[in-house]
Image (cartoon, rainbow, N blue to C red):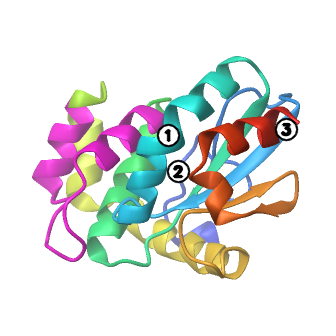
Amino acid sequence: MESSATMAVPSGHTPEGGVLVGADNARRRLVLFEDPQCPYCRRFEEVSGDLLRREVAAGAVAIEYRMRCFLGVESVRADNALALAAEVGRFDQLRRELFAHQPEENSGGFTAADLIELGRQAGLAGPDYEAGVRDGRYREWVVAVDRDFQEQDPHGTPFGILDGHPVETRVLYTPEKLGALVRG
């Protein structure tokens, strides 16, 4: 990644730039690459999100979300908001709101006003979050980290790696198979 000396770097992230949801000592580690504007990622959340939250709560798996922004400026704005949310422990709540209210790709959605309102729905209120959304506090970092993630995620989103091994896309969309895999 580019030198962080010249850009703002958010707290609440792994050294690789992801956000860990679950216990660091969980039995398994699932790395998931998602873009908040990707309709396939939204579908993945709809189909497998509840299962993954149950497995995280049971300690079977920890998920490191590595958010991509290759679908345009809307994704960059949303990832900036997610970085702000991670700093205060509300990443997954905002991530779920973004997918629940996802605009069409490249439609101008995820405006600052949209992200502030979705942040409120995710429990993010206050001038620091709002200012960070409006001024794009982590925009440069989001773009830099996406360049690194592009090398790790050559397949497109969603893409998963469980304990260092790629997960077949069809398994991501099949909760029974995904659950068996993460419990395995």
Image quarter hosting the N terminus = bottom right
Asked if labels 3 and 2 touch by Cβ distance under 8 angstroms, the answer is: no
Q: Is residue 2 visible?
A: no
Q: Which residue is mark 3?
A: 28
Q: Amino acid at mark 3?
A: Arg
Q: Is residue 147 above or below residue 159?
A: below
Mark nearest the camera among 3 and 1 is: 3
Q: Which residue is mark 1?
A: 86
**Quadrant hosting residue 175:** top right
Which type of secondary structure does the marked residue at label 3 adopt?
strand
Q: Residues within 10 Å of mark 3 (few under 14, many from 20)?
A: some
Q: Amino acid at mark 2?
A: Pro
Q: Residues within 10 Å of mark 2 (few under 14, many from 20)?
A: some
Asked if labels 2 and 1 touch by Cβ distance under 8 angstroms, the answer is: yes
Q: Position of residue 113 (x, y in %)?
A: 11, 50
Q: Earlier in the sequence, mark 2 or mark 3?
A: 2
Give the residue at x 48% y 51%.
44
Q: Earlier in the sequence, mark 1 or mark 2?
A: 2
Q: Position of residue 127 (x, y in %)?
A: 21, 35
Query: Mark 1 and mark 2: span between their CA atoms?
Result: 8 Å
Asked if labels 1 and 3 touch by Cβ distance under 8 angstroms, the answer is: no
Q: Is residue 106 visible?
A: yes
Image quarter hosting the C terminus = top right
Q: Which residue is mark 2?
A: 10
Which type of secondary structure does the marked residue at label 1 adopt?
helix
The magenta segment:
91-120
Q: Earlier in the sequence, mark 3 or mark 1?
A: 3
Is residue 135 a member of the stretch shown in magenta? no
Q: Is residue 183 above or below residue 166?
A: above
**Quadrant hosting residue 17:** bottom right
Q: Amino acid at mark 1?
A: Ala
Which type of secondary structure does the marked residue at label 2 adopt?
loop
